[in-house]
Amino acid sequence: MSLRSRSQIDDNDLVKTVKYAKERGKKVYVAINIFAWDETYDEIKVQAKILNDLKVDGIIISDGGVVETVKEVAPDVEIHISTQANTVSYHTCNFWHKNGAKRVILGRELNKEQIREIMKNKPDDLAIEMFGHGALCFGYSGRCFLSEFLVNRSGNLGDCAQPCRWAFNLYAEEKNKPGELLELDTDENGTYIFSSKDLCLIKELPEIIEMGVDSLKIEGRLKTEYYVASVVNAYRNAIDAIYENPENYDYTQYLKELEKTKTRGLTTFYFNDRNNTDFQDYSGCQYNWDYEFGGKVIKQLEDKVLIEIRNKLSVGDELELLVPGKISPIAFTIENLWNDETGEEIQTVNPGKAEQKVILKIPSEVKEGWILRRKK
């Protein structure tokens, strides 16, 4: 019910995850942002009751009926309005506020003048969140029917097949030759007529902060730890740098970090210019193939480190350690590898069994969960 219905998280996993995060002082917001059919409400009530008992910090909702249900079943939890609800005016913000919302996540299609207008006219105690980084959708802030129309998998129920990312061949029918189709010019990959670039507002952060927006949203569901760590760390450092020294903000060093993650091309979408057309990716290519997820720190072992690998690692590989709170990673070369079970020195380790581990030396103190990036 979170628009990621294939994420394979059941109620037990949800409880464990919330408790894990709360024990570490983190806030937890849970999405129930499908457009719900009547037969879904019994399940929604069960989950809302679980979330109320867990004291999560907010439930993210798109559907007015779900808002009313959550108000009744989970009265102790804040209601946040999902970007899927397509809020694009302060009038709509006022409506959601009157109906119990504490935060609204704006539609991604707004430009900066429209966001400023909302910030000036929305209720004082209504928090505003906006998207700063992540995938864009050919539908309106995710509200798309194409997937259900083509393959009977509804994006509005969390099961989008992402047909907007598919390659299409284009045909035209001549007026005087009905039924005779002519293929229009495409390359060997077809044409990606719907596929958009990814939103990136790292350069625009000073304006966003000046507007008074309360929170910046970064797409992270069903992404790897590597992607989330890289992107969130870049934006966190950039925001802190602006508050510390706004006159000398240099977005390029943060963009450089973002460009090390595998992504589509990047765009500012409509934020700066309502007439911008530079947000379609007609090649269907993934960008930034120079780096990949190398591994994750498990624990420090005296002068060595135990890591869980995510891709092949070999002696001589160049790695970067992502350090939370610092924009520049620590670069080093693998000089030795040791088998984690036998202690035997090895030259290469390949991902095979689940949670494959290896021991190596890292020229820095580390903490559990820190990410290693491998230069390909």
Image: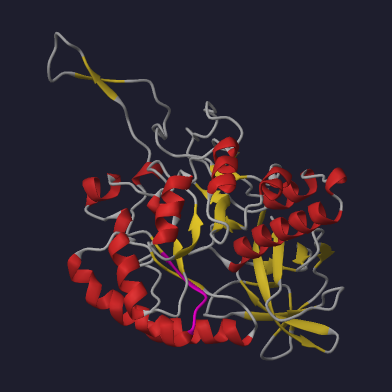
Give the residues drawn in magenta, as a range: 55-60
Horizontal relation, residue 110 to residue 376: left or right: left
Asked if residue 62 is among those painted magenta in the image, a careful observer would answer no
Q: Nearer the viewer, residue 276 or 372?
A: 276
| Residue 311 percent location from the top left of the image | 61, 66
| Residue 293 percent location from the top left of the image | 64, 63
**Image quadrant assignment for residue 352:** bottom right
Depicted 104 relative to depicted 264: above or below: below
Depicted 96 relative to depicted 88: above or below: below
Asked if residue 57 is among those painted magenta in the image, a careful observer would answer yes
**Residue 264 appears anywhere in the view:** no
Q: Nearer the viewer, residue 4 or 361?
A: 4
| Residue 242 percent location from the top left of the image | 80, 52
Image point 79% across, 48% down: which residue? 253
**Figure colour scheme:** secondary structure
Q: Quadrant of the C terminus?
A: bottom right
Q: Nearer the viewer, residue 331 or 53?
A: 53
**Residue 225 appears anywhere in the view:** yes
**Image quadrant assignment for residue 318:** bottom right
Tell how many labels.
Answer: 0
Image point 66% across, 61% down: which residue? 232
Q: Quadrant of the N terminus?
A: bottom left
Horizontal relation, residue 165 to residue 173: left or right: right
Image point 56% across, 65% down: which residue? 224
Depicted 146 relative to depicted 68: above or below: above
| Residue 108 percent location from the top left of the image | 49, 45
